[in-house]
């Protein structure tokens, strides 16, 4: 079937999705045009901001792809102090970001949990609950997830990384700390508690096929997610997966595939929030704008205190802004204007897909 006729359907099979993800040239453009239209019809031309706080790079996990994995002893480890965190949050609040995302290496200790508790409590106090809070702090018990929800976190982002258990096993150590089933269960808990649920995958991993990526999109649809953050896999030389870099697509193809993933997800799930992620930007400066133009509607400007940013080094070429955060914001605003979009300042930008009490 042609891409044009696939796009006219309302249900999409795995082979339809593979076809869309494989489109090139004129057909790829048809996909992008359809996704762009669907986005404007359903979520409009506002782009919502999540001030991204890379809270700590201390991690108990040892994922083979990630620069801050436990076994990488070259990393200078840090956690933000409470004051540093609250300063960043205040900045986001005052500048009208509408929401923040607290992202961290994964820890399950009491002290870690309690530090997040205090940040949530202080943020709710400072903003009278007006600032949307997304947590991205890995796998936790259902009890902890519930506790954080009660303290004011309303969204949680936990990437499944890949929906294929077989591929997941190739990317992680074979031990109790790295089980695909545990991650699935965590997503279930988050949904049950009532978070706006976010997940995502890496695109262009070694050993990953287009069929795997089609399954990833079907997984997101089936899981009925409210938000997605996904981006290209970018190798990091101090990780085990670096040994397989000869299996990778060129970076430009990984970028193209990532944009197609975003566009197809928008076609499959018209009203969810989709982030234009930082990893896109690491391949091409303007890639986030391309992602916005073809389906994404969320940007996550980094507002981590500058001196820690180099330490949250997940992959090579991670963009390190030379501008200050305010200049960066103006720059984003101008860039968005050029593609007919505007920033939803002072708006939380909740997922329109989200249905409480499901
Ligand atoms: N390339 C791209 N994304 C990566 N992540 C970790 N390592 C890499 C990499 N090498 C992503 C994972 C993780 C998030 C914190 O960063 O998807 O969930």
Image (cartoon, helix red, strand yellow):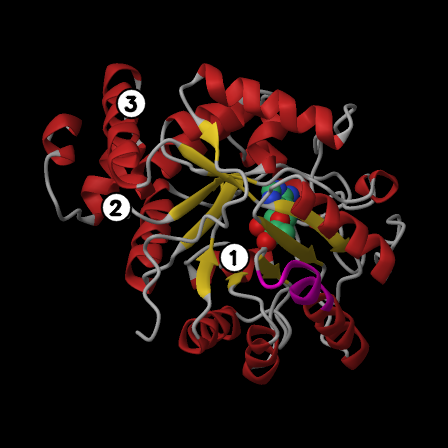
Categorize mark 3 by other alpha carbons within 10 Å: few (<14), some (14-19), many (20+): many
Most extreme residue toward the front is 128
The residue identified by callout 1 is 159
The residue identified by callout 2 is 268
Q: Marks 2 and 3, Cα distance to the nearest angstrom?
A: 16 Å
> Chief secondary structure of the magenta span?
helix
Above or below, 240 against 168 in this view is above
Above or below, 23 against 273 in this view is above
- Is ligand 1 within 8 Å of the beta carbon of the residue shown at mark 1? yes
Q: Nearer the viewer, residue 234 or 297?
A: 297
Say whether marks 2 and 3 touch (CB < 8 Å): no
x, y percent for residue 327: 71, 24
The residue identified by callout 3 is 28
x, y percent for residue 249: 50, 29
In what element is the residue under mark 1? loop
- Tell which circle, 2 or 3, labels the residue nearer the N-terminal end: 3
87 part of magenta stretch: no
Classify the position of the C terminus by image quarter: bottom left
The residue that appears at 79% across and 55% down in the rendered structure is: 85
- Tell which circle, 3 or 1, labels the residue nearer the N-terminal end: 3
Categorize mark 2 by other alpha carbons within 10 Å: few (<14), some (14-19), many (20+): many
Above or below, 197 against 236 in this view is below
The residue that appears at 40% across and 20% down in the rendered structure is: 340
In what element is the residue under mark 2? helix
Q: Which residues are magenta?
A: 122-129
Select label 2 or label 3 by which is in front: 2
């Amino acid at each position: 079937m042609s891409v044009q006729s696939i796009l006219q359907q309302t249900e999409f099979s795995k082979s339809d999705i593979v076809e869309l993800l494989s489109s090139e040239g004129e057909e790829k453009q048809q996909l992008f045009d359809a996704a762009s239209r669907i986005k404007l019809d359903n979520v409009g031309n506002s782009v919502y901001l999540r001030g991204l706080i890379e809270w700590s790079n201390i991690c108990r996990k040892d994922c083979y792809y990630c620069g801050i994995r436990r076994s990488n002893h070259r990393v200078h480890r840090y956690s933000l102090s409470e004051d540093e965190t609250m300063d960043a949050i205040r900045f986001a609040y005052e500048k009208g970001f509408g929401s923040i995302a607290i992202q961290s290496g994964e820890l399950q200790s009491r002290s870690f949990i309690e530090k997040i508790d205090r940040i949530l409590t202080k943020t709710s106090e400072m903003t009278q609950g007006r600032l949307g809070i997304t947590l991205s702090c890995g796998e936790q018990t259902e009890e902890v997830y519930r506790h954080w929800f009660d303290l004011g976190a309303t969204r949680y982002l936990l990437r499944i990384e890949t929906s294929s258990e077989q591929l997941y096993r190739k990317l992680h150590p074979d031990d109790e700390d790295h089980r695909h089933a545990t991650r699935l269960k965590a997503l279930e808990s988050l949904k049950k508690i009532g978070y706006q649920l976010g997940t995502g995958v890496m695109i262009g991993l070694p050993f990953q096929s287009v069929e795997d990526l089609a399954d990833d999109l079907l997984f997101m649809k089936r899981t009925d997610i409210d938000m997605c953050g996904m981006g290209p896999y970018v190798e990091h030389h101090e990780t085990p997966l670096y040994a397989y870099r000869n299996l990778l697509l060129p970076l430009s193809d990984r970028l193209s595939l990532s944009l197609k993933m975003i566009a197809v997800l928008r076609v499959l799930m018209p009203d969810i929030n989709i982030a234009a992620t930082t990893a896109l930007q690491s391949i091409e400066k303007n890639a986030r704008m391309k992602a916005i133009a073809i389906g994404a509607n969320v940007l996550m400007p980094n507002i981590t205190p500058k001196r820690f940013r180099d330490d949250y080094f997940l992959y090579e070429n991670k963009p390190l802004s030379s501008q200050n955060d305010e200049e960066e914001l103006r720059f984003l605003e101008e860039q968005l204007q050029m593609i007919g979009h505007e920033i939803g300042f002072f708006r939380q930008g909740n997922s329109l897909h989200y249905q409480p009490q499901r």
